[in-house]
Image (cartoon, helix red, strand yellow):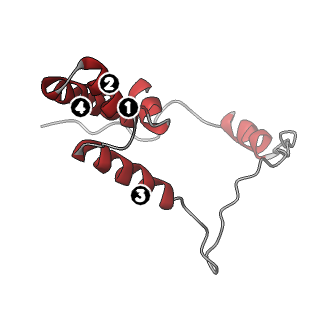
Amino acid sequence: MVLSLCGAIGLHWAALQSIAWAGMLISNARTGSIATAISHTFDGQHPCPLCKAIARAQQGGKKQDPQIAPGKIDMDCRRQPALLFPPRQDQTWTRFASSASAFSPEPLLPPPRGA
């Protein structure tokens, strides 16, 4: 449930972006000073391929919002008031109760005997 919630709020993009920034920081620190590496990593002017892929994926996800096409049925699930009815008094029980008193527990014929 926690992973589903994280995916729903876009936390996976933040995790991927953090990994991309860490990789960029390490790569930029090898070629220059730490201050320059931090500046190049977070200025937005020097994105790495992973940052570009993340940005494209985030923009692609926003464009795919579900929209209702004309002519399609919108299944609107509004809460409807529940109509409660009292239980009916069924008269069939009294008829069965009176016929049950005529029931005999003894069989009419003797049971068959095995050979």
Q: What is the three-letter code of the residue carrying label 2?
A: Ile
CB atoms of marks 2 and 1 within 8 Å: yes
x and y percentages locating residue 36 in the rendered image? 29, 26
Which numbered disc, 1 or 3, marks the residue that appears first in the sequence?
A: 1
Residue indicated by mark 1: 42
Q: What is the three-letter code of the residue carrying label 4?
A: Met
Q: What is the three-letter code of the residue carrying label 1?
A: Phe
Binning the other alpha carbons within 10 Å of mark 4 as few (below 14), some (14 to 19) or many (20 upward) gives many
The secondary structure type at the circle numbered 4 is: helix
- Quadrant position of the N terminus in the picture: top left
Residue indicated by mark 2: 38
- Residue 20's place in the image compared with 96, above or below, is above
The span from disc 4 to disc 3 (Cα, nearest Å) is: 23 Å
CB atoms of marks 1 and 3 within 8 Å: no
Which numbered disc, 4 or 3, marks the residue that appears first in the sequence?
A: 4
Residue 72's tag is none
